[in-house]
Image: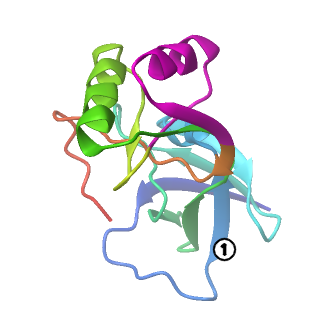
Amino acid sequence: MRFDCFKKAADHECSGEDDEIALPYDERKRSRGKCISEKGASVAWFLDRGEHLLGGDILVSTTDDFFSVKARPEPVSRVSATDNFALTRIAYHLGNRHVALELREHELLYQPDYVLDQMVIGLGGQVDETISPFQPEDGAYHAHPKH
């Protein structure tokens, strides 16, 4: 069975009966894609140009079936530092290189990259690889609502 999801559901709360799709960041950042849901349904989404999926979004199909979008855990580099100034400085240098970056209270996450890891270490940060859902910041000019 094929469900074509054409839009995000703006006013639907996630329920236990909704199907789920779990996608890594590289698949969620596309405005068009396809995957298999947790319950085995084929799902295709067609969003407006420039739009993308975030963990927590809900898709509605042409047959009024709902699919909850989850950020699938994936390999990431996790950065920590001895103090907030050092972590802020590292975030600045990563942002200056247009790295997709998730900001957390005492750590930063980005997709693994040996060169970036070495830069972070050179700036006094600690890097370890882990598996985690990855939801980077949208950026200042993206108008996607936060969940």
101 w.r.t. 1: above or below:
above
Way the structure is coloured: rainbow
| Residue 75 is at least partly visible in this image | no
Q: Quadrant of residue 74?
A: top right
Place of residue 20 in the rendered image (x, y in percent of width and height, measured from the top left): 65, 68
Tell me the residue at 55%/68% (across/down): 68
Residue 121 painted magenta: yes
Q: Amino acid at mark 1?
A: Asp
Q: Is residue 128 left or right of residue 96?
A: right
SS class, disc 1: strand
Q: Report the front residue among 103 and 24.
A: 103
Q: Position of residue 35 (x, y in %)?
A: 72, 48
Q: Is residue 138 left or right of residue 143?
A: right
Q: Is residue 81 left or right of residue 3?
A: left
Q: Quadrant of the C terminus?
A: bottom left
Total labels: the figure holds: 1
> Going 34% across and 32% down the picture, which residue do you hit?
50
**Position in image of residue 80 (x %, y %):** 46, 42
The foreground one among 45 and 84 is 84
**Screen quadrant of the N terminus:** bottom right
Residue identifier under label 1: 19
Of all residues, the one furthest to the front in this rendering is 82
- Return the residue nearer the eye: 31 or 130: 130
Q: Is residue 138 above or below residue 89?
A: below
Horizontal and vertical percent position of residue 134:
53, 47
Q: Residue at x 62, y 27 (%)?
A: 112
Queried whether the magenta region covers residue 95, the answer comes back as: no
**Residue for point 66% across, 60% down:** 21
Residue density around tag 1, few if under 14, some if 14–19, many if 20 or more, within 10 Å: some
| Range covered by the magenta-colored residues | 108-129
